[in-house]
Amino acid sequence: MLEKTFCHIPGISARVEHSLWRDGITSWERFPAEGGPFFSWKKNGHVALHLDESRRRLAANDPAYFCAALPSREHWRLFSAFAGSIAYLDIETTGLSREADVITTIALYDGREIRTYVRGENLEAFAADIRNYRLLVTYNGKCFDLPFIETALGISLPMAHIDLRYVLGSLGMRGGLKGCEREIGLSRGALDGVDGLFAVRLWHDWRRRGERRTLETLLAYNIEDVINLELLMVHAYNRKLAETPFGDELRIPVPEPAKNPFCADAGVLDRLRGW
């Protein structure tokens, strides 16, 4: 979809982009570099220069260029072009304050491999691993996960970022990550009803009792977030595509959910629920 995008160019609105598509200018390659029916010679040259730069940035695997040029609700357009450089990311913390609270676990999934990071074990390894990716996908990461990580670990995360909160919100899907999951029919099985507050209880219980099954239940919950982020990303991409002339041509099959390497322990969940 990215190579059919024109609204990242200054002066090209979504309305003008749709007009270009309607008149057969459906990709960068089909833009008439030597003039056309839409623009003056000067503006035509302006667009052509931006398209040349866009080709260079795409060839250089530079999603940050396009992320900076597009509004958050349009970041979905980067997905297929940079699929090989994506990391789905989610954190768990002891609370909402970047100053008073800490990160307990981080889950990272790139569509192939799942990695987890645990406070007191290997949390510091995250800083090196995340540098392998050019594009991050989160839910509400712009306001929470990314600034929390930067503060807690003292690192910068300059990568391009698709925050699905804004993309899904533009489709009328709200209610947080779990609400969006339910809307497309996803179930977490034993973890249904577990939320961020419960994850805090799991962490404190693990620290107090030292039972590995409690930590593994927390990790199972954290990993479920990143597994489902991939499914929500594909869902959002296909629904946004359907708003363009390219819905059938570029539609992506929904992948099978990744296998969660950890299982929630029913006994731990029941005990902490007070059953």
Image: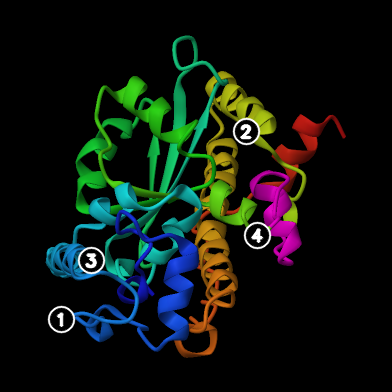
**Cα distance, mark 3 to mark 4?**
29 Å
Q: Which of 91 and 173 is in front in this view?
A: 173
Residue neighbourhood size for the residue with mark 3, other residues' Cα within 10 Å, grouped as few (<14), some (14–19), many (≥20): many
Q: Earlier in the sequence, mark 1 or mark 2?
A: 1
- The residue identified by callout 3 is 47
Residue 133 visible within the image: no
Q: Which of 20 and 118 is in front in this view?
A: 20
- On residue 199, which mark appears? 2
The reply to whether dot 3 and dot 4 touch (C-beta < 8 Å) is: no
- The residue identified by callout 1 is 34
- The residue identified by callout 4 is 171
The reply to whether dot 1 and dot 4 touch (C-beta < 8 Å) is: no
**Cα distance, mark 4 to mark 2?**
29 Å
- On the rendered image, what quadrant is the N terminus found in? bottom left
Give, as a three-letter code, the residue at label 2.
Answer: Ala
The reply to whether dot 1 and dot 2 touch (C-beta < 8 Å) is: no
Give SS at disc 1: loop
Q: Which residue is drawn at 55% across and 21% down?
A: 94
Q: Which residue is drawn at 35% across and 62% down?
A: 113
**Cα distance, mark 2 to mark 3?**
49 Å
Give SS at disc 3: helix
